[in-house]
């Protein structure tokens, strides 16, 4: 399967499609005057799970296109948690095994460790083959210095 055919497939919890997004969709600078570096699109992993006894699907049902979401480094390991604006987790940034795919989770994790601003928002929602609702977010990283 070529790249074009891969990109035409409907994303699912097991398929990750990452595309650059226009930086102009986010502020050019954060509140500290630091410039936007990159904007990426990521399909959230774990949307069929429960976190802290709350179903991710229940959280996702309350999300709308354009809603801000919070990205937070896990307190254990190098996972990046994805949370609603009221701090309820509904997934993780996924791992990528393909060396040609941008390492979004790694970039975000490192930015958060360095104290850089990372903004994210819901880009779209879709229905997976199993009936669960998936979420794609846009992520903008800003320089740390």
Image (tube, rainbow, N blue to C red):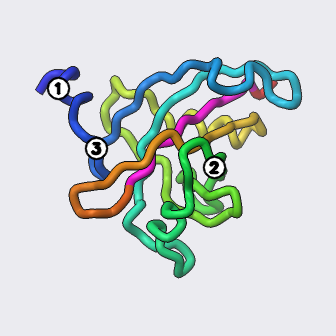
Residue at 63%, 52% in the rendered image? 73
> In percent of the image, x 58 and y 35: which residue is there?
139
Which image quarter is the C terminus in?
top right
As helix, strand or loop, the secondary structure at mark 2 comes to strand
Where residue 23 appears, as percent x and y from the top left, is: 62, 20
Find numbered disc 1 in the image and state the secondary structure of the residue it sits on: helix
Please identify, in this view, whether the residue under mark 3 or under mark 1 is nearer the observer.
1
Secondary structure mostly seen in the magenta stretch: strand
Query: Residue 10 falls in which quadrant of the image?
Result: top left
Which residue, given by chain and number where applicable, does mark 2 sit on? 69
In the displayed structure image, the side of residue 44 where residue 65 appears, left or right: right
> Sequence-wise, which precedes: disc 2 or disc 1?
1
User: Label 1 near label 3: C-beta < 8 Å?
Assistant: no
| Residue nearer the viewer, 131 or 73 | 131
Name which of mark 3 and mark 2 comes first in the sequence: 3
**Residue occupied by mark 3:** 15
Q: Position of residue 68 (x, y in %)?
A: 66, 46
Residue depicted at x 53% and y 53% = 79
| Furthest-left residue in this view | 1
- Residue 5 within the segment the image draws in magenta: no
Does any portion of residue 105 appear in the rendered image? Answer: no
Of all residues, the one furthest to the right in this rendering is 32
Question: Which residue in the structure is indicated by mark 1?
Answer: 5
């Amino acid at each position: 399967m070529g790249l074009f055919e891969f990109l035409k497939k409907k994303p699912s919890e097991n398929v990750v499609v990452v595309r650059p997004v226009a930086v102009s969709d986010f502020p050019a600078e954060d509140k500290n005057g630091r410039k936007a570096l990159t904007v990426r699109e990521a399909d959230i992993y774990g949307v069929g799970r429960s976190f802290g006894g709350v179903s991710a699907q229940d959280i996702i049902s309350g999300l709308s296109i354009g809603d801000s979401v919070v990205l937070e480094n896990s307190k254990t390991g190098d996972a990046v948690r994805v949370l609603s604006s009221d701090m309820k987790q509904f997934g993780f940034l996924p791992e990528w095994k393909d060396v040609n795919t941008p390492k979004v989770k790694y970039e975000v994790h490192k930015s958060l460790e360095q104290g850089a601003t990372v903004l994210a928002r819901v880009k779209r929602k879709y229905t997976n083959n199993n009936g669960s609702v998936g979420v794609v977010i846009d992520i903008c990283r800003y320089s740390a210095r």
